[in-house]
Amino acid sequence: MNGVGNTAYGRKSFQRSKAHFTDRITADGRDGWPVAADRYRLVASRACPWASRAMISRRLLGLEDALSLAIADPIQDDRSWRFTLDPDGRDPVLGIRFLSEAYDKRETDPPGGVSVPAIVDVPSGRLVTNDYQRITLDLATEWRALHRPGAPDLYPEALRDEIDDVMADVYEDVNNGVYRAGFATGQEEYEGACARVFRRLELLAERLAGQRYLVGDTITEADIRLFTTLVRFDAVYHGHFKCNRWKLTENQVLWAYARDLYQTPGFGDTVDFDHIKRHYYQVHSGINPTGIVPLGPDLSGWLTPHHRDELGGRPFGDGTPPGPVPEAEQVPARGLP
């Protein structure tokens, strides 16, 4: 998610920037960035759905000890994502106050601004990549040597074509679609985007009515990408982005599917509803100029039974759930249901 132009949202047509820094961290180091434990730091925001993908993948794969995590303040200022949640307002590993400092070491004033997720090379302090579409796929494939024992295969080779097709539709109409609706500047633009969001959600609900997960019988990258939008739907997209034909809680299939994932270790334990709500309602001043954060919705439903296990499926395939969340990475109580 971008750190610039927040006051312009809702005043000009929305166009998502492509990742400008597309270097990859790979097992063979072909881009100059070899996979290595303790070398890189993932900078994320719990508010951002794109960054949340990386946090979920990291948890599921057990990369906490290999790839350290920096959590940015959900409230940005004009200098980008900031580390005001840390003592003295500095990231304790990188020693910087703003993520833009790592970007500047790579390139000054880059196209697309300063975004998360970002992976930074700790020894040099330089940004490596902000390729939000690629980061999680590489965590699942290129980082295998550092995966925990029992880590799931989130991008199984035999299913990649189907996963890619599903993810492409989810990205276009759902992940990005809610933004096109929310940041629309005209009625026709908004109605077209909003209609596509709900048309795709209805098709996804049909797909999930008879199977527990989007592709195959285990959790894959496709589920991670849909979840990060669904978990924000009623809290921000329904009201703030005017995607209000119906609430997630009113769709029996998608609501049960989202609860199933939320209650799966690695998903809900990365979600901070307080960060999510404060970011969208306070930062997007072009849409919500008062900065008032709504009290609702009631979050207690996220912990209710979902019964999706009756469809079968094996969440982690032949693997096992991730271990407990490291103490330093636990979501504060105010961000939980």
Image (cartoon, rainbow, N blue to C red):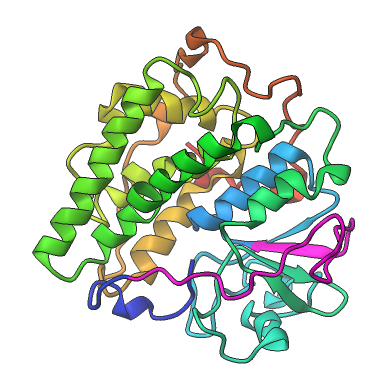
Residue 325 in the image: above or below residue 257: below
- Left or right of 165: which side holds 62? right
Horizontal placement of 115 versus 305: left or right? right
The quadrant holding residue 300 is top left
In the image, 14: left or right of 261? left
> What residue sits 57% from the left and 60% below the top?
132
In which image quadrant can residue 89 be found?
A: bottom right
- Does any portion of residue 156 appear in the rendered image? no
| Most distant residue in the top direction | 310
Query: Residue pushed farthest bottom?
Result: 108
Q: Residue at left 45%, top 54%?
A: 276
Q: Can residue 271 be seen in this view?
A: yes
Q: Is residue 138 above or below residue 33?
A: above
The majority secondary structure of the magenta stretch comes to loop
Q: Where is residue 118 in the image (x, y as percent from the top left)?
A: 65, 67
* Magenta region includes residue 31: yes
Q: Give the range drawn in magenta.
A: 15-43
Q: Which residue lies at the image location 46% right of the left edge and 16% below the top edge?
A: 305
